[in-house]
Amino acid sequence: MKTTKFDIADYLDSNEMIAEYLNSVLEEGDETEIITAIGHVAKAIGMTKIAEETGMSRPSLYKALSEGAKPQFSTVMKVLKAIGGQIHIEPLTA
């Protein structure tokens, strides 16, 4: 039996799936998990394409979105825009 390593990026193949994944992580995850999730989405879309749209180099992009990284907020916003996402704020329920 041959097994392969699971890679979530292989399953992020539609805008709806990407949005569902990111919203789920935003609701339940911490900042490290959120950055990692954005990295998974960038990988699914294509790091070269995201690098071009953000004006960042591919190595810088990989570094900024790697597990444990703490990118600047401006970097997160550039990547979110490049992957077709945005941050939306809703009031918390009591």
Image (cartoon, rainbow, N blue to C red):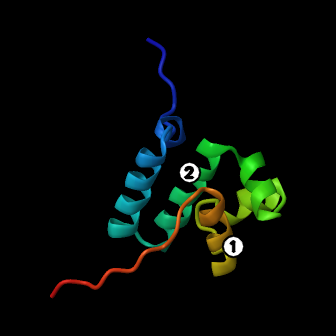
Which residue is tagged 1?
A: 75
Which residue is tagged 2?
A: 41
Where is residue 17? Give x, y as percent. Answer: 42, 45
Where is residue 65? Give x, y as percent. Answer: 64, 61
Secondary structure beneath dot 2 equals helix
Query: Would you place residue 90 above or below residue 9 in this image?
Result: below
Count of numbered marks: 2
Query: Would you place residue 49 above or below residue 72 in this image?
Result: above
Which residue lies at the image location 47% right of the left edge and 21% below the top edge?
3
Binning the other alpha carbons within 10 Å of mark 2 as few (below 14), some (14 to 19) or many (20 upward) gives many
Which residue lies at the image location 74% right of the left edge and 60% below the top edge?
61
Where is residue 30? Give x, y as percent. Answer: 42, 72
Tell me: 53 left or right of 9.
right
Which residue lies at the image location 51% right of the left edge and 38% below the top edge?
7
Q: Amino acid at mark 2?
A: Val
Secondary structure beneath dot 1 equals helix
**Camera-nearest residue between 30 and 12:** 12
Which residue lies at the image location 78% right of the left edge and 47% below the top edge?
48
Q: Amino acid at mark 1?
A: Thr
